[in-house]
Amino acid sequence: MRVSERGHTLNRPFQSIALLAAAALLLTATGCGLKVSTPPSGPPTLAPAAAPAATEPSDTAGSQGAPATSSASADAPKLTTPSAKALEYAKSIGGFDHKGQQYYFIVGGTFGTEAEAQAALDKATRGFGDRPAFFVVQHSDSFAGMTPGQWVVVEAHFKTPTDDNLEFARRGFPNARVQRARVVVSAPIPLFEDMVGGD
């Protein structure tokens, strides 16, 4: 009786181990174990990590968005704006926004400072007499096609300026020349044909 009891007590642990092993095999065979472990370590956790990297520069204004903005602004040209007085004068003689338009410009002269350009314009205006002129002070960075970094005195023309236009300009600006350029700023710029009429 003791032997059989011992036999039974010895067999019970082996039966339990056998049952556990069978249950583990059954779970593995049915895939239950894989379903439980997949969500925390599977692809769904990788997809959200990749998505923010693609959208962070444009959608967030956090610390990672700031370098992108400063980098873009560092690449953008730094435009120099004329004084309020120069802009008001340009507006008073019929200037308005021509941003994006390409014109012929009679360039009266180029200068190192706005004050020098303004002094040259004031002097030339006195020499023009009663005939109207539409020269204004601007910065060359305002025009794609002009050498950057200079102050210029210019008169905008829709058509190629005539010899008469150039001859008149040279009364005030002896070295006046014609240059084609595109306006890249929003600023009042008088257009010769708008002031005197014609196509």
Image: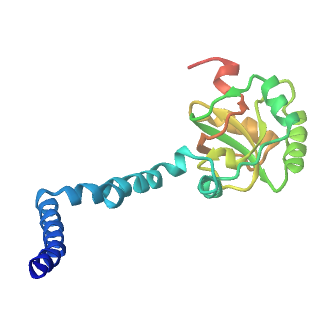
Compared to residue 127, the image places residue 93 above or below, namely above
Q: Position of residue 83 (x, y in %)?
A: 85, 40
Q: Residue at x 74, y 50 (%)?
A: 175
Give the colouring mode of the picture.
rainbow
Q: Position of residue 24 (x, y in %)?
A: 17, 65
> Which of the two residues, 33 or 65, is positioned nearer the viewer here?
33
Q: Residue at x 22, y 60 (%)?
A: 33
Q: Residue furthest top?
A: 197
Q: Residue at x 85, y 24 (%)?
A: 130
Quarter holding the N terminus is bottom left
88 relative position to 12: left or right:
right
Compared to residue 166, the image places residue 61 above or below, namely below
Is residue 132 in view? no
Compared to residue 156, the image places residue 69 above or below, namely below
Compared to residue 144, the image places residue 164 above or below, namely above
Q: Quadrant of residue 126?
A: top right
Q: Position of residue 165 (x, y in %)?
A: 68, 34
72 relative position to 93: left or right:
left
Q: Residue at x 72, y 46 (%)?
A: 176
41 relative position to 192: left or right:
left
Q: Quadrant of residue 183?
A: top right
Q: Residue furthest front?
A: 1
Q: Position of residue 106 (x, y in %)?
A: 68, 41
Is residue 73 in view? yes
> Which of the two residues, 37 or 193, is positioned nearer the viewer here?
37
Quarter holding the C terminus is top right
